Amino acid sequence: MAHIFQTCIVFPMSPEFHQLSEKVAQLAALTQSLRRENADLRLNVSTLTNQNTELLQRVEQAHLRVSALLEKLPVTQSGSPDTSSIDEEETA
């Protein structure tokens, strides 16, 4: 039985190759970090978008309530709402 021995010759890594290898490793780490940050930012955007939608709905509801209250106020001859009853209630 013949044994075949393969000899492995190890060449020392050139400094340029070593620097390139380190830069590739740094780039890979930075890419992973940016992917995590991007995912976090997308989640924050989604949360803030939902909050903004809820707040816009609340503002619209408040606008409708204020408009309804303004329509209930009596109108004076000048065409503006009569707020004298409101002023009396506030001072009481």
Image (spheres, rainbow, N blue to C red):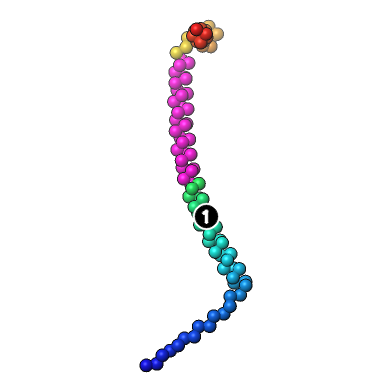
Segment tinted magenta in the rendering: 42-71
Q: Residue furthest toward the bottom?
A: 1
**Residue hosting label 1:** 33
- Residue 2 falls in which quadrant of the image? bottom left
> Residue at horizontal 45%, vertical 28%?
58
Residue 51 image position (x, y, % from top left): 46, 36
Residue 81 image position (x, y, % from top left): 51, 11
Q: Main secondary structure of the magenta part?
A: helix
Above or below for 34 versus 88: below
Which secondary structure lies at badge 1? helix
> Residue at horizontal 48%, vertical 43%?
44
Q: Is residue 76 visible?
A: no
Residue 52 among those drawn in magenta: yes
Q: Is residue 43 visible?
A: yes
Residue 11 among those drawn in magenta: no
74 lies left or right of 15 = left
- Residue 30 falls in which quadrant of the image? bottom right
Tally of numbered tags: 1
Viewport quadrant of the N terminus: bottom left
> Residue at horizontal 48%, vertical 16%?
70
Are there few (<14), some (14-19), or many (20+) residues within 10 Å of tag 1?
Answer: few
Above or below for 24 versus 92: below
Q: Tag 1: residue type? A: Ser
Residue 92 image position (x, y, % from top left): 50, 7
Residue 65 image position (x, y, % from top left): 44, 21
> Residue at horizontal 57%, vertical 66%?
22
